Image: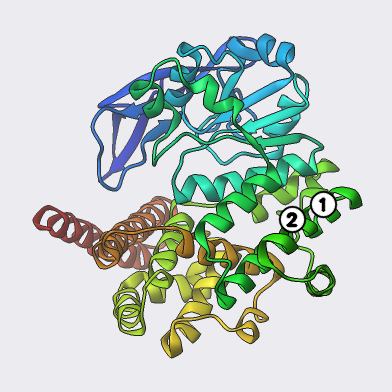
Amino acid sequence: MIERAGLVAVSEKSGTKKYYDRFRGRIMFPIADHNGDVIAFTGRYITEREGEGKYVNSPQGVLYNKSAVLYGLDKTKMEIRKTGVAVLVEGQMDMIMAYQDGVKNVVAVSGTAFTPQHLLVLKRYAPTLCILFDADPAGDMATRKSIALALAQGFTVTVGKVPGEKDPADFVFDHPGKLEKEIQKAVSVMEYYFDSVFAKYNAKKLDDKKIIAGILLAQIKKLPNKVEAHHWLEQLSGRLGTRMEYLEDEMRSLKTEDEFTVDMYARGEEKTEKPVMRRTNIDKLVEHILSLAYAAKDKAAFTKAYNVIVACEFAEFLRDVEKGSRDLVNEDTRAVFDLFIKYGKIDGTVSDDAKQELSETAQNLLSEILLTADIAEYENIEAELVSSARRMENEVNDSELRRLESEVRQEKDDVRRDQLFREVRERGAKKMQLASQKASA
């Protein structure tokens, strides 16, 4: 029973089934559906653990559909309906701390990316969404993805921000009673894009001016209201010192981005969600590793980062189509990684011709990686890259180990089983080697 409930996990080695506590060493929070019935649990680590996620959730099941459950909604749905605004945060602690601080219309994404199913749930209660994600590059990327989905579902969207590199929970802890005031400062989507882009780039420099125009024109082009689009074109023209007609010409030449094929989601074609939205831990690590490489400030630094990446086993592993079919990464991630390997050694940049080799969704992913590389400020790129590459080696090795162990249990042919056992032992030995390297690092 407790195994089916997801409270314990099972490990089968040498034919022996062993149970272990899925949430060991973590503070546990019950996850309830919108009616208040407990359907799952989440555990947050007490002290940070390298290579482990901050949160661990119950596995997906009949009762628990993490793509549709919003943490805290059972407690806050009436206030959300009353105010007409849902404040969306990333983690359970963010939701709890915000609620205790007086923000009663808050919900949290529960152990997954924000999805169209979440939006369908929220639409029952409020027409407006205020996104208040963590103030870091990952939070910024998640904010932009959530904006696209919410706008496609017809929400009015605003974006909040807490000062400094903090998440809402940390801000409440340091500044009790002040979160509501920060939420009231939330800005419109276009204000959010303008503020973040102009804060990063220098509009007096020609190269930066072109980057600013490219990013913001792509967003303005998506606006359905011509009056609003004209307003923001005027704003961009004034701040860049560029004539309106030039910006209009440039905007007409831009491709309209297919933001996660949200039109399909709107029609309820949920079967498209997996190939578009599925991102494993390895996908996220690949994106992070590539953003680190592209964040290198000069050719020498980029070359060093490139060499660190290609020297790892996962570099060849991820490019192997046969092994790639094991769903380690999605097609877009593999395509962007292949492009990096193919062209990255040349000059550390991605040319327009090279980008044309990618699908439109892969181009969008590459743009997000490059933008993250531009925005993020890493203290020590080389050290972070080595650490991330080590985590990647662990993830790939563990994934292969799980696959091999599964194949051993199903294989009937004795010769093939012996071969699989040898591969399992090799992967097990490598796991110990990687653990030893981590301990000595």
- Which residue, given by chain and number where applicable, does mark 1 sit on? 231
Query: Is residue 282 found left or right of 223 in the rendered image?
Result: left
Image quarter where the N terminus lies is top left
User: Residue 421: x, y in percent?
Assistant: 29, 61
Q: What's the residue at 46%, 64% (across, down)?
A: 373
Q: Outermost residue toward the right?
A: 226
Q: Is residue 348 above or below residue 72?
A: below
Q: Residue furthest bottom?
A: 346
Q: Tell me whether the residue at label 2 lies in contact with that at label 1, contact meaning CB atoms closer than 8 angstroms.
A: yes
Report whether residue 380 is seen.
Answer: yes
Q: Is residue 218 left or right of residue 52?
A: right
Alpha-carbon span between mark 2 and mark 1: 6 Å
Task: State the SS at label 2.
Answer: helix
Number of numbered callouts drawn: 2
**Where's residue 257, x and y in %?**
75, 62
Label 1 secondary element: helix
Residue 417, position in %: x, y?
35, 61
Occupied quadrant, residue 17? top left
Question: Residue 130: x percent and y percent?
Answer: 64, 31
In this rendering, the answer to whether 264 lies above or below 245 is above
Residue wearing tag 2: 235
Mark 1 residue type = His
In this figure, which colouring scheme has been used for the structure?
rainbow
Label 1 Cα neighbours within 10 Å, binned few <14 / some 14-19 / many ≥20? few
Q: Is residue 356 left or right of residue 313?
A: right
Residue type, label 2: Gln
Please give the name of the residue rendered at 40% of the width and 77% of the height, measured from the top-left corner: 316
Q: Nearer the viewer, residue 36 or 355?
A: 355
Residue 225 shows in the view? no
